[in-house]
Image: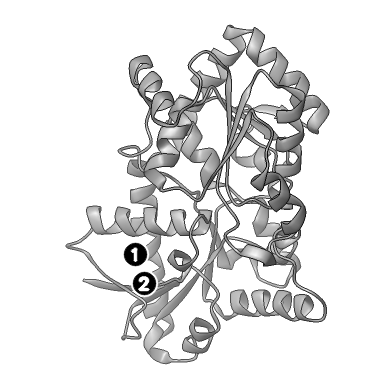
Amino acid sequence: MLKITMFSSADKVAGQGVGSAYRELIDLMQNNFQDEFDIAINRYRTSDISHYHTIDLAFYLSTFSKKRGRKIGYVHFLPETLEGSLKIPQPFRGIFYRYVIAFYKRMDHLVVVNPSFIDKLADYGIPKEKVTYIPNFVDSDRFHPVTAAKKAQLRDKFSLPQNRFIVLGSGQIQERKGVPDFIRLAKQNEDVQFVWAGGFSFGRLTDGYHELKQVVDDPPKNLRFTGIVSRAEIAELNNAADLFLLPSYNELFPMSVLEAFSCGTPVMLRDLDLYHSIIAGDYEPASDVSEMQMKLTFLRNDPARLAHWRHQAHLVAQRYSKEHLAKVWYDFYRQQAREGQTRE
């Protein structure tokens, strides 16, 4: 039996996509391969594989022990993707960014959730052959479409209007997520109900905290901030919505988008280059808030256009199903274990 130890502190901060991706992988491995993989969490034991999901200093120091076996790092962010997320003053920001890359370089192999980051890691001096692309996924047992009757019930549950077009965004409330644009769209469309599911996971360290907190405390009448909610509630909110909108300026492969796809919710995204290699043609693209406004008007007035993106959401959900990714992860761990044995 292969001994795999997962190292993560993602559960300590609620409302992070990193934590959602981590829990999905743990559940996938334990539910499918309990007779083949001996999985432990945050235990400093002798292992065949140590999979690091977060970059804690204690985890970094643990990599110098030979007991860790093959060291796998999960790349959920790079220094440039943190811009607009956390407010870290210099010189501490530069030191932290160097630490991030040093952590990745300590790994025997890295996993990225977006293939575009293979080249970016190469720019930091990490050979491409040491990096594997494995996309995120969500559990279709939890995230799936519901009937029209159930959708109406969910709107009642969250006190959302039955007869309004509802736009949902989710994730941490921060500048990088494009929350100011979401707020602007709400102000421009008073007859549309906007809902943002998420909160300030890092409190006052959040970039733009004070300005955003003022709006969260006193939002427009048609804009609701739910605060941090459970994953079950995220699934329900996706099914209650007519459109999922993420105006984020920088992402890898956001779990929130996959969650929307899995619920069959049409998706509009700021058209970032990094999406093109993973979900091109599967979402309504918009370059800026003006185009988002235009596309929102189109979608509200054209049921066929909205239905098209709903159909695309179903297709994406199939491509990134947990059944397919279970085999991908199984083969990956087995291959990494063989690599580790070869080097001994």
What is the x, y in percent for residue 90? 82, 77
Q: Residue at x 52, y 76 (%)?
A: 108
Q: Of helix, strand and loop, which one carries label 1?
A: helix
- Above or below — where is 295 with respect to 136? above
- Image quarter hosting the C terminus: bottom left
Amino acid at the residue labelled 2 = Ala
Quarter where residue 204 is shown: bottom right
Q: Residue at x 41, y 46 (%)?
A: 231
The residue lying furthest to the bottom in this view is 65
Q: Residue at x 33, y 57 (%)?
A: 330
Q: Of helix, strand and loop, which one carries label 2?
A: helix
Viewer-nearest residue: 118 or 283: 283
What is the x, y in percent for residue 281? 63, 27
The circle on residue 334 is 1
The circle on residue 182 is none
Residue 264 appears in the figure: no
Dot 2 surroundings within 10 Å: few (below 14), some, or many (20 or more)?
A: many
- Above or below — where is 215 with respect to 64? above
- Image quarter hosting the N terminus: bottom left
Residue placed under numbered mark 2 in the picture: 337
Mark 2 vs 1: CB contact within 8 A: yes
Viewer-nearest residue: 5 or 300: 300
Viewer-nearest residue: 131 or 255: 255
Amino acid at the residue labelled 1 = Arg
